[in-house]
Image: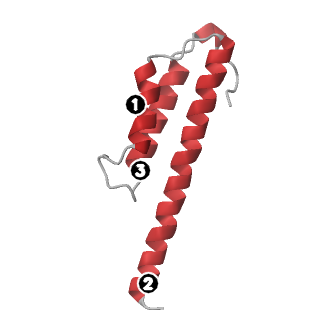
Amino acid sequence: MDSTTTLLLIAGVLAAVLLAGAVALLVRLVRTRRALLRAGLPTGPRWVFWGAVAYLVLPTDLLPDPVYLDDIGVLLLALRSLRSALPASSEPTRLP
């Protein structure tokens, strides 16, 4: 294998790992929102959830799509926003 093939292989594996991380965060975001809705707790503004999902799915990004770091950041901010919408007294010890 020459150096170009090795570099492309490493870049492909890194892109796949970042995509898997973004999808895992999306699943966690959806599960958290469902758990909050089932418990009757506030989920914060709807646009935060749907905006994060749209940002992951739509091709227009701050960084090109093989680099999912911006998508991961947006999903983490949305997850944090959902969790901060919880009232302090009813915050469970662990959400899925």
Residue pointed to by mark 1: 51
Q: Which element type, helix, strand or loop, lies under badge 1?
A: helix
In the image: residue 96, left or right of residue 3: right
Q: Amino acid at mark 1?
A: Gly
Residue 17 occupies which quadrant of the picture?
A: bottom right
Residue 10's x, y, as percent?
Answer: 48, 73
Q: Nearer the viewer, residue 69 or 19?
A: 19
- The residue positioned 61% from the left and 11% from the top of the image is 41
Judging by the rendered image, the residue that carries numbered circle 2 is: 5
* Residue 4: assigned label: none
Quadrant including the C terminus: top right
Q: Earlier in the sequence, mark 1 or mark 2?
A: 2
Question: Which amino acid type is shown beneath numbered disc 2?
Answer: Thr
Measured as percent of width and height from the top left, residue 18 is found at 50, 56
| Structural distance between the alpha carbons of marks 1 and 2 | 37 Å
- Give the foreground label among 3 and 2: 2
Query: Distance between the Cα atoms at labels 1 and 3?
Result: 16 Å
| Image coords of residue 86 (percent x, y) | 56, 14
Between discs 1 and 3, the one toward the N terminus:
1
Mark 3: amino acid: Leu
- Label 3 vs label 2: CA separation? 24 Å
Q: Is residue 75 above or below residue 39?
A: below
Which mark, residue 69?
3
Residue sitting at 68 percent across and 13 percent down?
39
Classify 34 as above or below 55.
Answer: above
Dot 3 falls on a residue whose secondary structure is helix
